[in-house]
């Protein structure tokens, strides 16, 4: 996971395709990501899917990445 200091409202994840090939995917966008300093990956709502929690926002994962690659932002 990464949050760019150039684009502080967007969180990204990176998928490794090969040793030197990475694909960037947007996790989600939130104005509150600008004040975030860390993140954790855990099943917050106990639905069996890993969610991503930042200090002021979390992205709920509602299914597999193929069907729902961005998840749902929850505040």
Image: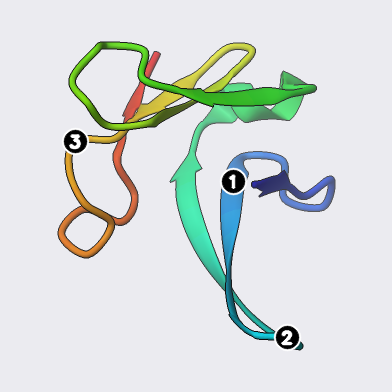
CB atoms at circles 3 and 1 under 8 Å apart? no
Report the side of 68 relative to 2 (left or right). left
Report the side of 45 relative to 50 (left or right). left
Residue 68: percent from left, percent from top: 21, 53
Choose mark 1 or mark 2, whichever is in front: 2
CB atoms at circles 1 and 2 under 8 Å apart? no
Residue 42: percent from left, percent from top: 45, 22
Residue positioned 64% across, 47% down in the render = 1
For residue 71, the mark is none
Mark 1 surroundings: few (<14), some (14-19) or many (≥20) residues within 10 A: some
**Distance from Cα at disc 2 to Cα at disc 3:** 30 Å
Task: Identify residue for label 3.
Answer: 62
Residue positioned 27% across, 32% down in the render = 49
User: Depth check: 59 or 19 in front?
Assistant: 19
Report the side of 14 relative to 7 (left or right). left
For residue 19, the mark is 2
Choose mark 2 or mark 3, whichever is in front: 2
**Distance from Cα at disc 3 to Cα at disc 1:** 19 Å
Mark 3 surroundings: few (<14), some (14-19) or many (≥20) residues within 10 A: some
Q: What is the total number of numbered labels drawn onto the structure image?
A: 3
Q: Quadrant of residue 36?
A: top right
Report the side of 17 relative to 64 (left or right). right
In primary-sequence order, the first of circles 3 and 1 is 1
């Amino acid at each position: 996971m990464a949050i760019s200091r150039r684009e502080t409202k967007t969180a990204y994840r990176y998928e490794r395709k090969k040793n030197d090939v990475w694909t960037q995917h947007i996790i989600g966008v939130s104005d509150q990501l600008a004040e975030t300093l860390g993140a954790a990956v855990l099943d917050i709502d106990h639905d069996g899917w890993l969610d991503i929690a930042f200090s002021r926002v979390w992205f709920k994962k509602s299914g597999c990445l193929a069907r729902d690659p961005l998840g749902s932002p929850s505040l």
